[in-house]
Amino acid sequence: MAEFGGREYGIAVSDSSTVFAYLANPSKSKEIDMIMVEKESQSRQILGTPNLRRLVIEMFSVFDRCQRGSSPDKPLDTASCCTFSTAYRSVLYNAAVSHNSTEFMTDFALWSLYEKLWFSPGNSSICADLILWANQSFNFVKEAVENAADALDPVSGIAEEFWKGVAITLLTCNFQECIELLSLLERTPEIEAFVGMLNFFDHENLSDEAMVDRVNEWKELMRENMANGSYENNENLKYMAKLLLGEERYLCSIAPRVLNEWWQYLPFYVLVKNPFAGHSELIELASECRYTFLGDEVPEEQDVFWCLVAKDDTNFQQLVASNPWLAVHLVDLIHKSTQDPEFALMRRIHMLDYASVLIMHSPLWEIGAGYLAACGIEGLLRLESHIEGIYIEDDEMAEQLLELCEMHRLEDAKSCVTNTMTIRYLKQNEWSAALAWALKTGSKKTIDMTVTRIVSSSSKDELAALRVLGSISSNSVLSLPSLTFLYSYQRFVKMMQSGDVLGCVQHLIPLIMMPGVPTQYYYDLFDYLIAIIKEDGRTGIRFSKEILYELSTFLSTFSLDKSRELNANYVKKVKVLKKMVMLKMADSIAKGIACS
């Protein structure tokens, strides 16, 4: 079990074959999101949330592009880093919206803030970046605006919910939404003065040194409105004007009542306290803002947003460790942009763990393999181990695994895949497929075993129909005796089925005398030869003295060499054949048949 930002991630095993991965909010004990339910079976179906699986796929797509577009020896340039960062956070945002998840929206906000503070080129002011970050990341503002608009009732008047929505838009620096809400009210001098003051502000002025006076004019306008009593008849607007002026008492009281997190308050706090703050001033302002909102409730080292702002890398890495989207991809991008050895270590640890989960417990094994391949020697060793234990669903998956093994030279894993498929098809009596996979092993032992099983277990029709043999080149056929025998044996069977007796004789005798033929095959071959010799007189086939002499010599040697392997039927069969060959040879000599 791991916890991050008020969330818990974990894996539960209900029995020996089912694994549940879940996401829970401890503050809401009944709310649990099931991420994956993995049932280990032949179909290996994954029953879970499609949006989360899509998130895994899309995050890997960005990671793969980033991996290809970066060098292990050179940091990413700022422009490339920001491009990849934008792609990552876009995936997180889409997941948050489609999954309707505040947790993923928090991930999106965290990633976006890191990008603004540490990936961006720094050609704009920090306050302007924070305001832009708030406008892009605080999705809850939209709901607050809708609720505020719904709270307006012509009969009962302006409800407290409306002013809460106005306060949320103001405190998150979404000034345009604030203006739109106020425009729903009856136009009064107070509202016009407040809206005019908000319209006067432009956050882009914060990044232009030439516009510093314009920002100061905006602050001066607020003070003049207060001094002139422009909001005296509307206490809510007067309260919000004092917030914009940065009055401490008001800053401390309102934010915790309308916002959920201190970092949602940070852009506004920096704006009213020091709109031209640099990084050093930002840390001090963030500390003040956080204390204003939380007090001493949560230690700084346990607050991931604080560690991000304060650039406390050690604690930041520990806090994101339980969140796979951040621990793998954000840490990887930080490492690629900085080449920091500390991030290199954390990147490898997080990525190895994340990849192992993907490759072993879901159909997303290809993605898991991609992450492992990006982890150097250690990743490839773990990839090889996983491939040797993975369930191979079909030929397509096996071919993909084989390609992966060949790409990374994982010879042991390659042997495991090819042997697994060979044995699977042998058990199913799929001889062509079994032989095809056996050939891919490149192993003499596996090929010999496969040939033996095919010849001993297949019917003559099945043997004649073997597709793989027709595509084997002569060189590869001659490389192994078992393949040479199978190739010749198939040709003999086809001739026999077609009634080509002369062709049968021409192939059968060399087949019998071929070296390395498994003993068990001779029984059928001898039967064929006996039948052909018996039919010699009817068919008109003549055996030369030379061939008959070679046969006689072979059979004598065969009896001696195979004496321990032959059973009684075999011994009897060889004796009959030897006698027939000797009689045939004597007859040939008597008739004076010339050697061919």
Image: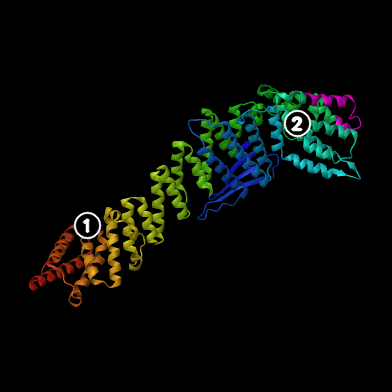
Residue 399 image offset from top left, x and y in percent: 44, 52
Q: Which residue is mark 1?
A: 515
Considering only vertical position in the picture, is 104 above or below 337? below
Residue 267 image offset from top left, x and y in percent: 72, 30
Query: Does 156 appear in magenta?
Result: no
**Secondary structure type for disc 1:** loop
Q: Residue at x 82, y 30 (%)?
A: 197
**Secondary structure type for disc 2:** loop
Q: Quadrant of residue 338?
A: top right
Which of the numbered marks, if any, corresponds to residue 202? 2
Query: Does 231 appear in magenta?
Result: yes
* Residue type highlighted by circle 2: Asp
Comparing 189 with 53, the one in front is 189
Considering only vertical position in the picture, is 395 above or below 271? below
Residue 253 image offset from top left, x and y in percent: 80, 29
Q: Residues within 10 Å of mark 1 (few under 14, many from 20)?
A: few
N-terminal of the two: label 2 or label 1? 2
Determine whether, in the image, residue 299 is placed left or right of residue 543: right
Magenta stretch secondary structure, dominant: helix
Inspect this view and state whether residue 295 appears.
no
Estimate the spatial distance between the alpha carbons at disc 2 and disc 1, rounded to whole Å: 91 Å
| Quarter the N terminus occupies | top right
Q: Quadrant of residue 424?
A: bottom left
Q: Residues within 10 Å of mark 2 (few under 14, many from 20)?
A: some
* Residue type highlighted by circle 1: Pro
> Which residues are the magenta region?
216-238
Residue 63 image offset from top left, x and y in percent: 54, 40
